[in-house]
Image: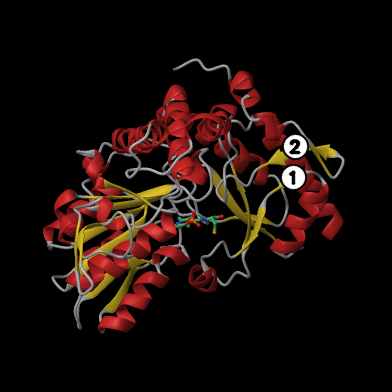
């Protein structure tokens, strides 16, 4: 057991020490976006106060510092993901952009009419809509691995679904509404056996548990910086070098070309090929600082902490009449989605806000899944390492009050 002074860690997050609606802020909406520690905020301030310039093009001191900081962040992200090299990391605005990049470029090159894109029924809209758009353009078909009663994937169906026509199997690591942790390595192995390429949506796992692309055996992995203590608008796509280099460019413009004439252009290799124009330099610098910060605590330690809070939350929610938790009981990430018989998720979430408690209520960008579950949505509490057991108890007390209020 690693010994961490969690109170000291929490003090690194200035935003948490405030009152909301006259009550101490109880921030349990971390699956939507995490808060930022001083180390990340300072990295942004330092960058803008000392090093700010454009990257890759300037032959002056500040530009070379900015370039070093930007490319240094790429190396950090590559290590964090266990990638073979920094060339396998394409900076993006986040998970959504990373998945769209793959659907549009890899899809344009490799997907044809009659091919199948395999997804799961628990995908966030950002790992569904881009594939629907690709299917519309190409005549490919979508298939879905069902979600079973207990909120896990019905893996016994995989044999029927993962056939030779499947070109891509794209699935989430952790469901943002059910909390299910999918067996990524097993799914990637099964996909490889039929020659399908894999994409892992790591939006909900990236800052919460160890993620190693080579251990997983995935071809692509997408994540957002803002869910792992980094600035909004930062994130990355990991892609195996061989695949990235086989993909056509996406956005055209500066920095992604080798030669340009009035008629045509030739393009750089990845990752520059996919990073046209001036990138989010400060965002990447902040992302690098977030990687350092998280690694300073340790992802396995963060996962243990998440899990302890989740178990405690499940126990406390289990005491409340008319409250039903969605998703698996055991193996799950640090979030709990639930319904309360007496209250619509939006009303319950608004009630919580009156008490300084930030939850999320609604379909969580999982509309088809909510429809399948016959739910208008859920209310979701999602934890991070700066949350405490005392906060989970306070949440339970507020929800108990809501049960009485809405009765
Ligand atoms: N889920 C949530 O509250 P972006 O918006 O690109 O940073 O992340 C999209 C995304 C993709 N996949 C999963 C599994 C996600 O959870 C998210 C973002 C937030 O659950 C906002 S809807």
Secondary structure category for the residue under label 1 = strand
Q: Mark 1 sits on what residue? A: 357
| Lateral position of residue 348 relative to residue 4, left or right | right
Q: In the image, what residue occupies the spot 61% across and 25% down?
A: 12
**Looking at the picture, does residue 209 appear above or below residue 322?**
above
| Lateral position of residue 295 relative to residue 317, left or right | left
Question: Pointer 2: residues within 10 angstroms few (<14), some, or many (20+)?
Answer: some
| Lateral position of residue 336 relative to residue 160, left or right | right
**Looking at the picture, does residue 367 appear above or below residue 97?**
below
* Contact flag, marks 1 and 2 (Cβ < 8 Å): yes
Q: Is 324 in front, or is 92? A: 92
| Residue 333 shows in this picture | no
Label 1 to label 2: alpha-carbon separation: 9 Å
| Residue 121 shows in this picture | yes
Q: Residue 246: x percent and y percent? A: 15, 60
- Residue 169 badge: none
Q: Mark 2 sits on what residue? A: 394
Mark 1 vs 2, N-terminal side? 1
């Amino acid at each position: 057991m690693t010994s961490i002074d969690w109170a000291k860690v929490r003090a690194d997050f200035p935003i948490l020490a405030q009152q909301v609606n006259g009550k101490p802020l109880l921030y349990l909406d971390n699956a939507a976006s995490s808060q930022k520690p001083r180390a990340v905020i300072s990295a942004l301030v330092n960058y803008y106060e000392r090093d700010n310039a454009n990257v890759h093009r300037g032959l002056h001191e500040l530009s070379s510092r900015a370039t070093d900081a930007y490319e240094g962040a790429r190396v950090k992200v590559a290590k964090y993901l266990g990638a073979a090299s920094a060339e396998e990391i394409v900076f993006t605005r986040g998970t959504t952009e990373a998945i769209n990049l793959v659907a549009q470029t890899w899809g344009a090159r490799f997907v044809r009419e009659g091919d199948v894109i395999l997804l799961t029924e628990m995908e966030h809209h950002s790992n569904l809509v881009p594939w629907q758009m690709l299917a519309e353009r190409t005549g490919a078909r979508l298939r879905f691995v069902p979600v079973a009663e207990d909120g896990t994937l019905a893996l016994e169906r995989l044999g029927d679904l993962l056939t030779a026509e499947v070109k891509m199997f794209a699935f989430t690591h952790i469901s943002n509404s059910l909390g299910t942790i999918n067996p990524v390595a097993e799914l990637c192995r099964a996909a490889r056996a039929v020659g399908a390429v894999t994409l892992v949506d790591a939006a909900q796992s990236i800052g919460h548990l160890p993620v190693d692309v080579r251990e997983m055996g995935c071809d692509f992995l997408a994540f957002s910086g803002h869910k792992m203590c980094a600035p909004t608008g930062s994130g990355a796509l990991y892609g195996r070098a061989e695949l990235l280099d086989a993909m056509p460019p996406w956005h055209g413009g500066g920095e992604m070309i080798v030669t340009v004439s009035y008629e045509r252009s030739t393009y750089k290799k990845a990752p520059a090929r996919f990073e046209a124009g001036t990138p989010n330099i400060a965002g990447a610098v902040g992302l690098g600082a977030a990687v350092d910060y998280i690694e300073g605590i340790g992802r396995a330690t963060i996962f243990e902490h998440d899990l302890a809070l989740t178990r405690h939350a499940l126990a406390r929610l289990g005491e409340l009449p008319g409250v039903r938790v969605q998703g698996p009981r055991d193996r799950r990430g640090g979030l709990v989605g639930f319904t309360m018989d007496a209250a619509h998720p939006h009303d319950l979430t608004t009630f919580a806000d009156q008490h300084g408690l930030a939850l999320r209520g609604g379909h969580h960008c999982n509309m088809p899944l909510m429809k399948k579950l016959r739910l208008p949505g859920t209310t979701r509490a999602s934890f991070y390492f700066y949350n405490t057991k005392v906060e989970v108890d306070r949440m339970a007390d507020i929800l108990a009050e809501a049960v009485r209020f809405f009765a």
